[in-house]
Image (cartoon, grey):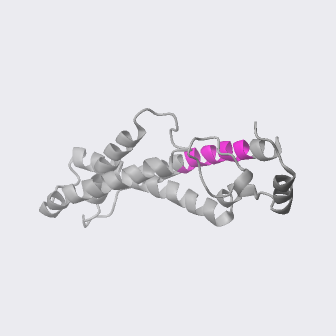
Amino acid sequence: MRRTTFRHAQRVARFPRSDSQRYVSPRVGGPRYPPDMRFHFYIVLLRCSGASGIGVLLGCAIASLFGLLLGRISLTPEWLLGAPVLALLGAVFGLATARLTCLWLRPCIARRRLLFTLIGAGALPLGFGGINQTTQPGPPAVVVVLLSAAVLVWLWFRGFQRELALVRQYRWGR
């Protein structure tokens, strides 16, 4: 146990800790920024937009997969040449997504990074596979994209509410 000296008490009284130094993250190796930054309007808007963007990408991938299986989309030579590069970029984006969504999208899943890397490696080439077609996307494709975006925004909102309640509990005891 540390013994408090008079000089130490003077220093603490002169330089009180800020909220960011007082905040203890519930996760090991948690965020280093103040908890108020997370709930700033622009940050919340960016996080919601990111969740909807992930949903749109997954919806495009699902719609393209259905289009490939049903024969509405053909595999062009350009897509076949670009698929390995898109898979590599998708793996990197999947790894980044696993890190950025660890608080709200399946937080307790085992082998999270590996799963998200594999999903990203498959979703990005499939998501861009149906874009170069000259025909308009059909109504089922639009419904799948909008539905997947809405589901991911809903999941993000649930995680955001949990995170907000946890921070309120730690900060104000409510």
Residue 91, percent across and down? 31, 51
State the residue at coordinates (77%, 57%): 17
Chief secondary structure of the magenta portion: helix
Q: Nearer the viewer, residue 82 or 107?
A: 107
State the residue at coordinates (38%, 50%): 95
State the residue at coordinates (82%, 59%): 11
Count the labels in the image. 0
State the residue at coordinates (59%, 52%): 31
Q: Quadrant of residue 81?
A: bottom left
Residue 150, percent across and down? 53, 50
Visible in this render: residue 59?
no
Q: Nearer the viewer, residue 99 or 87?
A: 99
Q: Nearer the viewer, residue 150 or 155?
A: 155
| Quadrant of the snapshot with the C terminus | top right
| Quadrant of the snapshot with the N terminus | top right
Give the answer, above or below, for where 124 lies relative to 111: below
Visible in this render: residue 11?
yes
Return the residue found at the far left. Answer: 77
Q: Is residue 126 left or right of residue 169?
A: left
Q: Is residue 110 left or right of residue 170?
A: left
Q: Per the image, is 170 magenta?
A: no
The magenta segment is: 153-167
Q: Per the image, is 157 magenta?
A: yes
